[in-house]
Amino acid sequence: NLMKRDDCKKYFMDEMVRLMDGVFSHDNVCKTIDDMNSERYSEMLLYFDHLENLKKSDDSIWIWYDEYQRRTQNIKDFVKYRRGYIEEYLIEAFELSEDYFS
């Protein structure tokens, strides 16, 4: 098992920290989501207008723009707390000191 080698474990941990500080950081993920939402904003408004018209004849359609925004916020909230969960997992899995990520 490569993770029993100190050099592999160090490389893995360094890479995890780099990713958590970069592409998986709360700021970066939220910026990416916001950028994507900005790019597709006009299309989403058309889509939700279309759904509103369909709801008149189909009561199984339940989604609406506010729900879309709430679900987007749920993703951002998940990302906000994800780093802490990852750190806790890595500390336990690799038997690291509690202050390893401090």
Image (cartoon, rainbow, N blue to C red):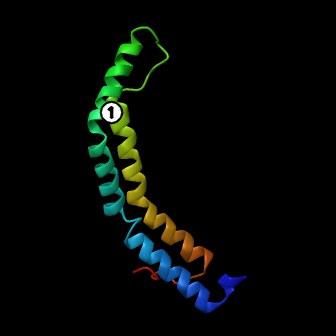
Q: Where does the image place residue 92, in percent across and percent down from the top left? A: 59, 74
| Left or right of residue 55, residue 66 in this image | left
Q: Which residue is mark 1?
A: 44
Residue 41: % across, % down: 28, 38
The quadrant of the picture occupied by the N terminus is: bottom right
Pointer 1 local density, CA inside 10 Å: few below 14, some 14–19, many at least 20 = some
Q: Residue furthest top?
A: 57
**Type of residue at label 1?**
Met
Quick one: quadrant of the C terminus? Answer: bottom left
Q: Where on the picture, by quarter, is residue 53?
A: top left
Residue 44 vertical placement versus 77 (above, below)? above
Q: Residue at x 52, y 80 (%)?
A: 13
State which quadrant residue 68 falls in.
top left
Residue at 50 percent across and 67 percent down: it is: 86
Q: Quick one: 50 or 21, which is closer to the camera?
A: 50
Is 73 displayed left or right of 1 in the figure?
Answer: left
Instruction: State the residue lying farthest toward the right.
Output: 1
